[in-house]
Image: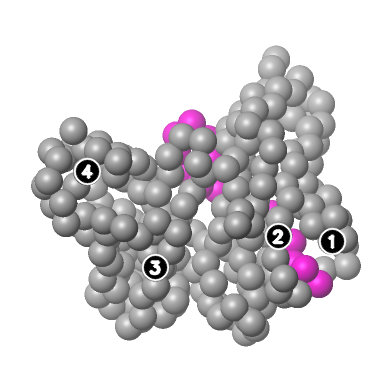
Amino acid sequence: AQKITQTQPGMFVQEKEAVTLDCTYDTSDPSYGLFWYKQPSSGEMIFLIYQGSYDQQNATEGRYSLNFQKARKSANLVISASQLGDSAMYFCAMREGRSSGNTPLVFGKGTRLSVIA
Amino acid sequence: NAGVTQTPKFQVLKTGQSMTLQCAQDMNHNSMYWYRQDPGMGLRLIYYSASEGTTDKGEVPNGYNVSRLNKREFSLRLESAAPSQTSVYFCASSEWRGTFPNTEAFFGQGTRLTVV
């Protein structure tokens, strides 16, 4: 069963506008972490932001914030004030907690974001 | 600080040929991973090694073998390459601290493999 779902294959946003990239997840483990990565056209994987399942507040890192809705099992990435350099592929990923052992990251299929000038 | 280093960056193989993708990390991480990335499929886990001396299958292990040579190095071997193994391969590493999965994985720059 797919554990991470990203329903938006592609998104467009105007420069300087905010954009939300959707991510829903599925796990029965109460302890888990959610991660977002950026992959620009050059191909490298860049870690952006992390949210733990027990965190009371939504994570923020500069222009990135994570809209964490635990009951809905969603962890949407919000990018504020989009820049041309934000054009890239974005991946949501999850790692389950101790009850599953030392588990690897499981990725969604990604969303390609294009920022328009 | 090199992080995770993969070799080679590009490779073309003929069907049936074998090759080994090399990966080394200098962050003293316990866990290492091999993923493949195909268009529209995201990153799929091939094999991982939670710690030195252990390896486990991921989502798409068929056609691959791995070796955790030591704490630093984790290699991926294609014994008889097939066109379906044309992909971009990523090695990654991470640390497992305490009881909570709060550590991100660090990725190598990827290997673009074409099997003809």
Of the numbered discs in the image, which one, if any, rests on residue A97? none
Q: In which quarter of the image is the N terminus of chain A?
A: bottom right
Q: What residue type is labelled 1?
A: Lys
Residue A68: x, y in percent?
Answer: 83, 55
- State the residue in front, A34 or B105: A34
Q: Quadrant of residue A63?
A: top right
Q: How far apart are marks 3 and 4 (CA)?
A: 19 Å
Inter-mark Cα distance, 1 to 2: 11 Å
Name the residue tied to disc 2.
A26
Q: Closer to the camera, A65 or A34?
A: A34
Kindly report which numbered mark, 1 or 4, lies closer to the viewer in this rendering: 4
Q: Disc 1 designates what residue?
A: A70
Let me know if residue B8 is in the magenta part.
Answer: no
* Crowding near the residue tagged with mark 1, few <14, some 14–19, many ≥20 C-alpha atoms within 10 Å: few
Q: Which chain carries label 1?
A: A
Q: How many labels does the image show?
A: 4
The alpha-carbon separation of the residues under discs 2 and 3 comes to: 21 Å
Q: Mark 4 belongs to which subunit?
A: B
Name the residue located 29 percent from the left edge and 44 percent from the top edge: B85
The reply to whether the magenta stretch includes residue A50 is yes
The lab-note entry on whether marks 3 and 4 share a chain reads yes
| Amino acid marked by disc 2 | Asp
What residue did someone put label 3 on? B57
Residues drawn in magenta: A37-54
Q: Which marked residue is nearer to the observer: mark 1 or mark 3?
A: 3
SS at badge 3: strand
SS type, badge 1: loop
